[in-house]
Image (spheres, rainbow, N blue to C red):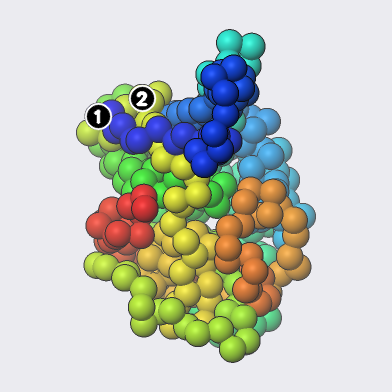
């Protein structure tokens, strides 16, 4: 299924100026429209370096993690996960096309990758953060999630994207993850000894959030939080990145720069947050207006059942937050 979105158009023309025909002609050449095309792709080993950059400079930068190993795990699992790539094509014949990995969403089974170092590093760090925040209940629940138990498969969800990614891309991106998991568990194309890993029963994830700035009005009362996978490689033209969904604030006084994260956070069976040292990574991706009024940067950690995870995805699909202005 191919989804088409309106193409963005950026121009430096000043409609109020009256210019001669020659001057107007020159302006037309200099102010060529920029069309940005976004595509969904399966993770591939060719994207190793781009994926490595995303995860290293993203949500997990507070950890001393083997990012090379993690990136290799992500790109090596082509059956589950999606990479979002953008390609800007200028109207000028002299301009070159440039393709950028600007987002990823995937889920890795903790038991399947137990032989590698990153699962242990992440889980030990999260458990320590839960205890350090004095949240004994969350720490106990987290331990129950990650404790090897027969019939339980826990997936660690990795979600990285530019904050100003066009909002209409978010629902199909998250729906694709659900469909990938379902397909991988049922299809005979996956080896028999590998398929059980894809029968996820629980999910754990981490999101960036901020404390609401002191004195800032909590917009939670105003926010509207509602209630075969498209073929990857199919082009989707998206609207201007300035139309990206704005950050949202929860009743707990947390601001989520990516609205989709709050849907999962609100469905979680356990959740906690901890402070981190802010970095310039998010600014490089485009933090939007919310950058002006934020408190302490934090990480939100949460766990969901399979049912709650899928319900959150459905609410994301139905939410007006992801409809371009």
Q: Is residue 115 left or right of residue 91?
A: right
The quarter of the picture where residue 40 lies is top left
Q: What is the secondary structure assignment of the residue under circle 1? A: loop
Give me the residue at 36% from left, 50% from top.
324
Give me the residue at 57% from left, 29% from top.
19
- Report if the CB atoms under discs 1 and 2 are less than 8 Å apart: yes
**Residue 119 picture location, percent across and down:** 61, 52
The quarter of the picture where residue 26 lies is top right
Residue placed under numbered mark 1 in the picture: 1
**Residue 130 picture location, percent across and down:** 61, 77
Cα separation between marks 1 and 2: 8 Å
Give me the residue at 32% from left, 69% from top.
225
Q: Sort mark 1 into few (<14), some (14-19) or many (20+) by Cα contacts within 10 Å.
A: few
Give the mark, 1 or 2, whose residue is nearer the N terminus: 1
Mark sitting on residue 273: none
The quarter of the picture where residue 20 lies is top right
Q: What is the secondary structure assignment of the residue under circle 2? A: loop
Give me the residue at 50% from left, 49% from top.
242
**Residue 182 picture location, percent across and down:** 28, 42
Which corner quadrant holds the N terminus?
top left
**Residue 246 picture location, percent across and down:** 47, 61
Residue placed under numbered mark 2 in the picture: 234
Please tell me which residue lies in front, 5 or 182: 5
Q: Is residue 83 above or below residue 105?
A: above
Q: Sort mark 2 into few (<14), some (14-19) or many (20+) by Cα contacts within 10 Å.
A: some
Q: Is residue 15 above or below residue 2?
A: below
Let me know if residue 26 appears in the view.
yes
């Amino acid at each position: 299924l191919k989804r088409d979105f309106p193409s963005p158009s950026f121009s430096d023309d000043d409609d109020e100026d009256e210019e001669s025909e020659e001057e107007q002609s020159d302006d037309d050449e200099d102010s060529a429209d920029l069309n940005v095309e976004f595509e969904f792709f399966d993770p591939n080993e060719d994207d190793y370096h781009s994926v490595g950059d995303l995860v290293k400079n993203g949500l997990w930068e507070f950890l001393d993690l083997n990012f090379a190993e993690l990136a290799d795990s992500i790109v090596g699992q082509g059956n589950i996960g999606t990479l979002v790539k953008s390609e800007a094509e200028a109207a000028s014949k002299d301009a070159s096309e440039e393709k950028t990995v600007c987002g990823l969403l995937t889920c890795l089974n903790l038991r399947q990758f137990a032989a590698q170092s990153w699962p242990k590093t992440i889980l030990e760090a999260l458990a320590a953060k839960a205890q350090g925040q004095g949240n004994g209940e969350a720490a106990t629940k987290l331990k129950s999630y990650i404790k090897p138990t027969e019939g339980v498969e826990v997936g660690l969800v990795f979600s990285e994207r530019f904050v100003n990614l066009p909002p209409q891309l978010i629902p199909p991106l998250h729906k694709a993850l659900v469909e990938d998991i379902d397909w991988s568990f049922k299809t005979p194309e996956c080896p028999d000894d590998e398929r059980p890993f894809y029968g996820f029963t629980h999910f754990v994830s981490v999101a960036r959030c901020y404390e609401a700035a002191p004195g800032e009005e909590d917009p939670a009362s105003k926010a509207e939080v509602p209630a075969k996978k498209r073929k990857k490689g199919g082009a989707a033209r998206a609207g201007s990145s300035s139309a990206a969904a704005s950050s949202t604030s929860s009743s707990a006084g947390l601001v989520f720069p990516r609205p989709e994260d709050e849907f999962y956070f609100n469905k979680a069976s356990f959740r906690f947050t901890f402070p981190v040292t802010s970095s310039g990574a998010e600014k490089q991706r485009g933090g939007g207006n919310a950058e002006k009024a934020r408190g302490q940067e934090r990480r939100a950690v949460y766990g969901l059942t399979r049912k709650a995870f899928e319900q959150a995805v459905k609410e994301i699909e139905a939410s007006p937050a992801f409809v371009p202005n």
